């Protein structure tokens, strides 16, 4: 590409108008934050329709209207194909390509800007359709520091950068930020002197210092992945795992001392594991190799023109949706003003660290939702819906934008994490819960050992008694009675009695309150930190 002119160029006087329009088109689209431009060519009428496509609609773009000039029709098709090195004679099958445009201030443009266009052409009964994804080369190659995320989330990525082998999977629809995230991670590894190989379809960004392969008939994802093994790589990106052959090749790479990133089709993080099982990968291999799974979306948010209005309570329909997402709060208020564009977007992350308890569920449970339940105790874990709702509570987006992005069907993941239990008990607000998570994350980032319940108490949001009573309602609370049994304060018979009465309440009452009610333990014996530090087989960790 380095030998090409900076922009589309005119070769005759007849094509100059069409070439100028093409260059203006992509400059205007980048100025307005448009992610995809669609060109519909109608062969019979020699008409081109210029459309803007986003997550929810397709609509006309630019001041030109329907282009009915036959010369411009031919210029648009021929110049785009030529720039993307696509054979002009290929009209009856789909083709892909890449184009780089370099606007320069000294050439009369308002600023220096380099755009990478990812081109897809399909034949239609009317003619053909070109879709060009527009990516600003400067903003797309972002560092992890440039990606908006909270501290607990960043800790996860910092931990990943210390890994030497294993798998990291990312899922999300087209335009959800997967490529930007993965490239930012790979750039961090590059700065650490790692040997990086990628295979993509197509390569979206040419990055100096990476060995990058475009998928072809001769070099498939699977063949490229196997070839990498002989190249002494440290970090590998396999653009997409869509078949068993590629999935097996990726597993082999991870099991032979390589850190492998890949994308896969799934709606949520735990669904990634389901997809790998469907591709025929043994559960034990998945549990052994997988380090992290990430589901990602981009939420449109208010930009520079933040509306100055008061937040309002949600409608009855909104309340029902929030309840379905497991995130309803009767005190909730949201911005009532709809977005006027989707130019500004923030990433949403649903992440699962494959810890020993998650690994056990992958191996043993037939219900894939159990994986999310096991992960829900991890500090960084939020469903995509919960993450988006939190941003809406902060006034960054209207709830309507959240519902549109997430969809009407939401999955509620039951959680026994301390902050969720305290919210349910009315001892903590959602905003305070996020502060607790960030407080803990900052402590961990500074190298201090800090459990979430310690942050709750340090911030003064709940007492030790409230924390222990919340823990006393968890599904494994009865195991904590082992602390008193081991210290000879309870007999087995007394413990059995407490557990039986606790189960009779359907865990609505803290198991420790029941012990006090029966006068088998005292307030002073129960409400001590040692209860929360207690470790025993079958007891889920308090993160």
Image (cartoon, helix red, strand yellow):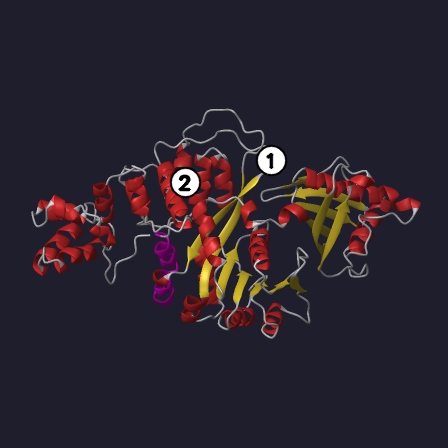
Residue 126 appears in the figure: no
Q: CA distance from mark 1 to mark 2?
A: 24 Å
Locate residue 51: give its quadrant.
Answer: top right
Do callouts 1 and 2 mark residues in contact (Cβ within 8 Å)?
A: no
Q: Which mark is residue 429?
A: none
Q: Main secondary structure of the magenta part?
A: helix
Q: Is residue 424 above or below residue 375?
A: above
Quadrant occupied by the N terminus: bottom right
Q: Which residue corresponds to the image point at 8% horizontal and 47% vertical from the top-left?
A: 518
Residue stretch rendered in magenta on the structure: 358-377
- The secondary structure type at the circle numbered 2 is helix
- The secondary structure type at the circle numbered 1 is loop
Q: Is residue 444 left or right of residue 101?
A: left
Q: Is residue 113 left or right of residue 157?
A: right
Crowding around mark 2 (Cα neighbors within 10 Å: few <14, some 14 to 19, many 20+) is: some
Residue 252 appears in the figure: yes
Q: Is residue 255 left or right of residue 218?
A: left
Question: Residue 150: horizontal and vertical position, in percent?
Answer: 46, 44
Q: Which residue corresponds to the image point at 42% horizontal and 36% vertical from the top-left?
A: 318
Is 164 colored magenta in this rendering? no
Question: Residue 123: horizontal and vertical position, in percent?
Answer: 73, 56
* Residue at the top extreme of this rendering: 309
Q: Which residue corresponds to the image point at 50% horizontal and 60% vertical from the top-left?
A: 169
* Residue at the right extreme of this rendering: 13
Instruction: Check disc 2 and report the residue beneath it.
Output: 321
Instruction: Check disc 1 and report the residue beneath it.
Output: 341
Locate residue 54: give its quadrant.
Answer: top right
Q: Nearer the viewer, residue 128 or 526?
A: 526
């Amino acid at each position: 590409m380095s030998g090409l002119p900076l922009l589309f160029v005119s070769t005759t006087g007849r094509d100059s108008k069409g070439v100028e329009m093409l260059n203006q088109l992509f400059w205007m689209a980048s100025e307005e934050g448009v992610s995809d431009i669609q060109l519909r060519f109608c062969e019979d009428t020699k008409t081109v329709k210029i459309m803007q496509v986003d997550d929810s609609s397709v609509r006309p773009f630019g001041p030109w209207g329907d282009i009915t000039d036959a010369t411009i029709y031919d210029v648009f098709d021929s110049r785009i194909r030529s720039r993307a090195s696509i054979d002009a004679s290929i009209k009856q099958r789909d083709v892909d390509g890449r184009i780089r445009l370099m606007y320069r201030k000294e050439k009369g443009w308002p600023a220096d800007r380099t755009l990478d266009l990812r081109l897809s052409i399909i034949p239609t009964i009317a003619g053909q359709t070109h879709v060009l994804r527009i990516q600003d080369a400067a903003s797309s190659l972002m560092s992890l520091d440039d990606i908006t995320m909270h501290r607990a989330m960043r800790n996860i990525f910092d931990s990943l950068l210390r890994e030497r082998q294993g798998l990291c999977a990312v899922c999300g629809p087209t335009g959800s930020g997967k490529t930007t995230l993965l490239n930012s991670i790979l750039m961090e590894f590059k700065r650490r002197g790692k040997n990086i190989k990628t295979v993509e379809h197509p390569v979206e960004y040419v990055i100096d210092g990476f060995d990058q392969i475009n998928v072809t008939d001769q070099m498939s994802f699977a063949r490229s992945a196997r070839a990498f093994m002989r190249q002494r790589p440290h970090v590998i990106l396999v653009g997409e795992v869509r078949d068993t052959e590629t999935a097996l090749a990726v597993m082999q790479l991870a099991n032979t001392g390589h850190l492998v990133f890949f994308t896969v089709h799934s709606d949520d993080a735990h669904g990634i594991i389901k997809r790998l099982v469907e591709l025929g990968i043994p559960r034990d291999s998945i549990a052994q190799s997988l380090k992290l799974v990430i589901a990602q979306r981009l939420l449109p948010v208010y930009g520079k023109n933040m509306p100055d209005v008061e937040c309002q309570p949600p409608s009855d329909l909104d309340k029902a949706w929030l309840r379905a997402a497991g995130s309803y709060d009767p005190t909730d208020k949201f911005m009532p003003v709809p977005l006027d564009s989707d130019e500004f977007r923030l990433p949403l992350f649903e992440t699962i660290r494959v810890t020993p308890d998650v690994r056990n569920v992958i191996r043993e449970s037939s219900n894939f939702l159990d994986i999310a339940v096991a992960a829900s105790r991890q500090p960084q874990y939020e469903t995509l819906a919960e993450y988006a709702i939190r941003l809406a509570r902060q006034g960054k987006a209207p709830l309507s934008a959240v519902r549109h992005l997430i969809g009407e069907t939401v999955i509620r993941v039951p959680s026994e994490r301390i902050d969720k239990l305290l919210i349910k008990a009315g001892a903590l607000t959602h905003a305070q819960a996020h502060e607790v998570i960030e407080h803990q994350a900052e402590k961990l980032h500074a190298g201090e050992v800090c459990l979430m319940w310690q942050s709750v108490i340090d911030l003064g949001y709940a007492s030790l008694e409230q924390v222990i009573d919340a823990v006393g309602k968890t599904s494994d609370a009865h195991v904590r009675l082992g602390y008193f049994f081991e210290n000879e304060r309870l007999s087995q018979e007394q413990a059995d009695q407490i557990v039986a009465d606790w189960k009779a309440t359907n865990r609505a009452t803290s198991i420790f309150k029941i012990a006090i009610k029966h006068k088998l333990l005292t307030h002073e014996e129960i409400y001590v930190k040692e209860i929360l530090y207690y470790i025993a087989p079958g007891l889920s960790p308090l993160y």
